[in-house]
Image (tube, rainbow, N blue to C red):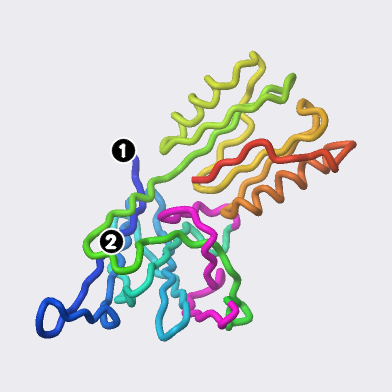
Amino acid sequence: MMRHFYLLFLCGFTAIGFALTDVRTNARTYVGACNETSHSELLVAIRFFENNEWRTQGWWKIKSQTCQKLGPFPSERALYGFATTSSTDPEASEWRPTWSNELACINLETDFDYAEKADGSCKAREAIKIPMGKLSDSGFRGLVNFDMKESFISVFRSASSGEIAVSKDRKAESAKLAAKASCTPNDCEELVQVQNQCFSFAIGHDAAKDYGWGKNASLAKAHELALKNCRESSQEPELCRIIASECP
């Protein structure tokens, strides 16, 4: 059975007097984080807007097969979420409700509660910025289940032609079989399988010899790594270019 991590977004609105009274400035919301993966612990960070500034808090530690109520948070604006199996391991599996370019200040070394400056930079010197996933649009009322199942990206490649086939699936074996079936040359072999991270592939003048790939939580970083690896293996590094990419 596929185990997965998901966030539940619950908005609560309060009203005073008649039903027409709108007091959204007092609205609060909770996020329920459930760890149904095989990982013993997941670390969760939430980004929210309060007192005219963006703040990000973490890490909530969710044990395997348990749920935890996080919050309350203000609900006037969208919330953003991020979960990881480790805050320090660069190869850690990561989850977001949706992929976005929304950046948040976090600390990879310890628990934190950070606010951003007016220009979007982090107030704390030790903070770094990572992409977060959007949990909900402003003013949403009700209960939403953000199904954050694991994602596997399999890549097969032909050594003779340089042809590649990329497939993404919730199950590792399904992703592998689909990529293998899509790679037509007889000498296709698995190049890599990436879990819960972005993948990028670059080729140079000779696709059979000049190539490189990269994986990272950031698609831009995956591109950077793929181009770097391609240029290091090519006699004409300026010709390296990205030809394929995929994110969870």
Q: Secondary structure at mark 2?
A: strand
The Cα–Cα distance between marks 2 and 1, rounded to whole angstroms, is: 19 Å
Q: What residue is at 67 percent from the left and 17 percent from the top?
A: 187
Q: Which mark is residue 247?
A: none
The one nearer the camera, 172 or 28, is 28
> Quick check: 162 left or right of 247?
right
Residue identifier under label 1: 1
The one nearer the camera, 26 or 226, is 26
- Quarter assignment of residue 82: bottom left
Q: Main secondary structure of the magenta part?
A: loop
* Residue segment shown in magenta: 90-119
> Quick check: 243 left or right of 124?
right
Residue identifier under label 2: 67
Q: Secondary structure at mark 1?
A: loop
Whether residue 115 is in magenta: the answer is yes
- Residue lying farthest to the front in this orientation: 20
